[in-house]
Amino acid sequence: MGPPGAGKGTQAKKLVEKFGVTHLSSGDILRAERSSGSALGKKLAEYMDAGKLVPDEIVVRVMAKALTGGAGGGLLLDGFPRTLPQAEALDAQLARAGRPLDAVVVMTAEPDLIVRRITGRRSCPRCGRVYHVEFMPPRTADVCDACGVALVRREDDAETVVRNRLAAYNRQTAPVVEYYHGRAGLKVIEVDGGKDADEVLARLVEAFEAMGAGGR
Ligand code: AMP
């Protein structure tokens, strides 16, 4: 969990490689539905482009399907749950499956850093590789190193939309962190997402290994 730009996606990709778990990113799943051009996808675009949260009933339905579709083994949820009703729905589904949550990672970052990180973010429409105009530029400006195609910016990465996404996090998602705090048997790992990505990863790997997770 963490505000947009705290580094959730970046760390999730590295943790998936390290621990061999399945990555379920609600943002990626919703974006895929959105670009499919379905009726649901058109509805999603209205919320996503404005930086608003997609209504709970839709997200819960889409994520419940993704959760049951997994190949078994460990799961790393990224961007879900983002509201209390989503957290309750997830608890109910995991309880039915007999697979309780082991840990919650909470990543923090300062608002100004978040805006700088997100507005400079670019990605390759072909391979999905993510760059940053300032922090991780491609060899040739605005072109993917691997595919040679022009990089794109996510529509919801414009500054006004980022500010809305941040406000949505503070209003709707921060209470979910409180919901998990103090729950018996659930480890809450807090990290400063403003730090260098390798430093953040080292801290997360250490915390997971201390819980008995086997790395690759
Ligand atoms: P992300 O890639 O995680 O930043 O998500 C991008 C956008 O997808 C968000 O701004 C929301 O509009 C939508 N979204 C992703 N996950 C959720 C969620 N759990 N609940 C509601 N909306 C979501």
Image (cartoon, rainbow, N blue to C red):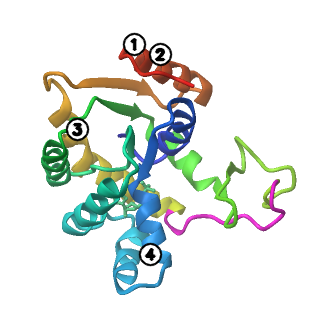
Q: Residue at x 41, y 51 (%)?
A: 24
* Mark with earlier residue (4, 1): 4
Query: Mark on residue 188?
Result: none
Q: Are marks 2 and 1 in contact (CB under 8 Å)?
A: yes
Q: Are marks 2 and 3 in contact (CB under 8 Å)?
A: no
Q: Quadrant of the N terminus?
A: top left
Residue 13 vs residue 93: left or right? right
Q: Nearer the viewer, mark 1 or mark 3?
A: 3
Q: Residue at x 23, y 67 (%)?
A: 55
Residue flagged by tag 1: what amino acid is it?
A: Ala
Residue flagged by tag 3: what amino acid is it?
A: Arg
Percent of width and height locating residue 41: 40, 79
Say which quarter of the image contains residue 176.
top left
Q: CA distance from mark 2 to mark 4?
A: 36 Å
* Mark with earlier residue (2, 4): 4
Query: Any atom of ligand 1 within 8 Å of the CB at mark 1?
Result: no
Q: Nearer the viewer, mark 3 or mark 4?
A: 3
Identify whether 38 is placed above or below 25.
below
Q: Which residues are magenta?
A: 146-156
Q: Residues within 10 Å of mark 4 (few under 14, many from 20)?
A: some
Badge 1 is on which residue?
A: 210
Residue flagged by tag 2: what amino acid is it?
A: Glu
The furthest residue to the top: 210
Badge 2 is on which residue?
A: 206
1 magenta-colored: no
Badge 4 is on which residue?
A: 34
